[in-house]
Image (cartoon, helix red, strand yellow):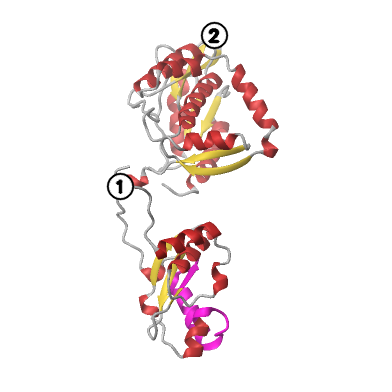
Amino acid sequence: MGSKLSPILAQYVMDHQLDSILPKLPYTVLFVKKFVDDIMMIVPETFIQLTLDLFNSVCVDLQFTLETEDLHHSVPFLDTRAYRQDKIVKLKWYRKDTHSDKIIHFHSDHGINVKINTINQMKRRISKICHKSFIDEGLKKLHQILKENDYPNSMIKKLLYANGTTQNEQTEEQNMTTDRTHYASYPNVTNLTGKLKNVFREENIKIAVQNQKTVRSLYTKIKDPIPTSFQSNVVYKIKCETCDKCYIGHTSQWLKSRVALHRSDIRKYPERCALAAHAHNLDHHVNFEGVEVLKTERNYQKRLIHEMININKEDETINKKTDTNKLSSIYSYLLERIKMEPFYDGPIDE
């Protein structure tokens, strides 16, 4: 469980299971549907137990359970209920009795577009999977679920029961301008992100909103901390024991591997980096045992920016001046101002 291979292996196993069993059945299989390990079949009533026994005979560790149709000639399958009516199978949107019916709450910290898309996607799913005789019932059930999650009634009616012409026109228009559209991401900030999106819309820039309050942020870290020497994708700081200077660097490797390269460079290739040149040429001792991790960042470009910012923040660094050439002039100005005087952003009570 939890492995990325699990669904792939499940598909292979179930395909093998069906290929082994179907030829052995003493009747013609008229209807069979499979999704991973869930199977729906039409089986003659007299062969139900035989079919189950054949499925359970392939592997002792792989045993199936059986659910037969009820008095209404229906059986649940995934999030649908299949009805056998008029010699055809009709699908109806289905929620188990134990389902909580909880979706993204209207007052949650998500952008309004996320909530609108949630309604549209659920409506689209009902319209696509349900037989036309069950669509209205499915939409009424969805209406009730949305009300229980505090969605405004006006929004529900507009999105569930609109004819969709305007939305299709907008989609066509968006498809026509895709080549000229630029995309960016921005944190979801109440009363700010929406205004920014409106400003950039005139420039044909679409902003994808990121949530800052995630499920991960609600829980404490229960895993043991990774030792400093085995951390990777970090910005680090190494101090010189002989003088007050320090060196700021970044690496995607284990930190102990990067430190080992620094030690080797000091002995063999002092021209390779500023730290090696400083220690070799001045015969200074570097405190490799006290290396500090300043920032962890998997993205290379972001990690590079963090390195340049930390170099700029230090008064005495061993790094070359060229190490901060790519830092934005705006960042450089702000960092210099912070060094000279505290940054003033208005009174605290504003």
Q: Which residue is mark 1?
A: 348
Asked if one can make out residue 233 in the rendered structure from this viewpoint, the answer is no
Q: Which residue is drawn at the image coordinates 48% and 34% (left, top)?
A: 194
178, above or below 343, in the image: above
Q: Which residues are magenta?
A: 248-275
Q: Which residue is drawn at the image coordinates 51% and 14% (left, top)?
A: 161
> What amino acid is at disc 2?
Asp
Q: How many marks?
A: 2
12, above or below 248, in the image: above
Q: Is residue 61 magenta?
A: no
Q: Which residue is mark 2?
A: 86
Q: Residues within 10 Å of mark 1 (few under 14, many from 20)?
A: few
Q: Which mark is residue 59?
A: none
110, above or below 280, in the image: above
Secondary element at image label 1: loop
Q: CA distance from mark 2 to mark 1?
A: 72 Å
Q: Nearer the viewer, residue 214 or 199?
A: 199
Residue 335: image location, x then y, percent: 45, 61
Of label 2 and label 1, which has the lower sequence position?
2
Determine whether, in the image, residue 288 is placed left or right of residue 308.
left
Viewer-nearest of discs 2 and 1: 1
